[in-house]
Amino acid sequence: MGLTGTPFILLICVLALAALAGVVWAAPRAGRVLPARVGLLLVSQVLLLAALLTVANAYFAFYGSWGDLLGMSGGAGSGTGDPAGHRPQGGSGPDGPDPLLVPVHDAFIDGHRLPAQDGRLEAVTIHGARSGITALAYVYLPPQYFQDRTRRFPVTLALTGYPGNAQNLVTRLRLPQTAAQEIAAHRIKPMIFVMMRPMVTPPRDTECTDVPNGPLAETFFARDLPAAVQAAYRTAPAPAGWSALGDSTGGYCALKLAMRHSDRFAAAISLSGYYKALRDITTGDLYGGSPAYRNENDLDWRLRHLPAPPVDVLVTTSRVGEKDYQATRRFIALVRPPMRVASITLPTGGHHFSVWNRELTPALRWLSGRLGV
């Protein structure tokens, strides 16, 4: 029974209501037997809390499966051939053997399958040769990818928040659907989207960082993933044809990847992202106790103390309802050439998908003008 499936949600809600009704019926009959009264209240409260958390998780899709919740998620499974007519390539380059991207299946996500005229959505497994990380991704291929077999396409790495679920980018942000509409209307150029969550070693929140004696998440996103995607698909060369996009934690990751790896990414979009990672129970010590390494991952510090990278970035926020408003204004003020910054500031908003849906279309139009073919 799936964690986010309707049967499980209904079961938990029914149990919670039954427990509440049981308390109302049994409490008077328990009399002064304190353990019985406490037990009844405890069971009902636990079930009510479980019901609330289950509904919230289903709405926001923080955890998509029991494996996600328990930190036991692996890759997407074994491949089933090459359904799209492109085959992963091996080989070696100046940095060692290329990693491997394995098509798993034509993605069908919570009832969402793209019409053929809008392109194709694939589920793939990416094996990182340098990082040792294996992670699931969804790849959107525009219809033009199949119409012109000689053409190469820009690529955008899209990251959701933490803990997040890559499916959110399809079901909640509606990234491939919006891109397909904009491409069909000739408002943005056809491009490939590689959609993931930033948590590639669950349940650790790496903030897309190479953690000393820990996961090499930055290496995975900045080196392994581009090499795998370039080997499997017809992609435009980096950095002119590559960008990163994300919401919340994914927004911070997108900015950091572009600013730290301008040889790989030419542009980045941060939807309600932030500018440095906080230390909490989900992150642990990301920097091995090194203040210098922590500063390198602080985007404001980089702009104050290091040469500005030659990248274009777009940041979004809301004057009311978004905690990052002041931080975003400060970041914008720090940007200097050759780096360029644009922004979308809503009068009211918040930290949720309904706001990011409003910002996505103008953000994609901005991005299209910054990517080469």
Image (cartoon, rainbow, N blue to C red):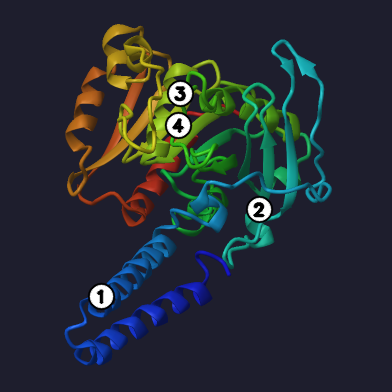
Residue designated by label 1: 35
- For the residues labelled 1 and 2, the Cα–Cα distance comes to 61 Å
Is disc 4 surrounded by few (<14), some (14 to 19) or many (20+) residues within 10 Å? Answer: many
Q: Is residue 373 visible?
A: yes
For the question of whether residue 336 can be seen, the reply is no
Residue at the image position 51 percent from the left and 51 percent from the top: 70
Label 3 environment density (alpha carbons within 10 Å; few <14, some 14–19, many ≥20) = many
Nearer mark to the viewer, of 4 and 2: 4
The residue beneath circle 2 is: 119
The residue wearing badge 3 is 258
**Residue at image mark 4:** 206
Residue at the (79%, 35%) spot, across then down = 88
What secondary structure is marked by label 2? loop
- Determine whether, in the image, residue 155 is placed left or right of residue 269: right
Residue at x-position 50% and y-position 40%: 158
Single out the mark in the foreground, 1 or 2: 1
Comparing 150 with 10, the one in front is: 10
Compare residues 85 and 290 and report the one nearer the observer.
Answer: 290
First in residue order: circle 1 vs circle 2 = 1
In the depicted view, which residue is nearer to us: 234 or 131? Answer: 131
**Which of the marked residues, 3 or 4, is nearer the chain's N terminus?**
4
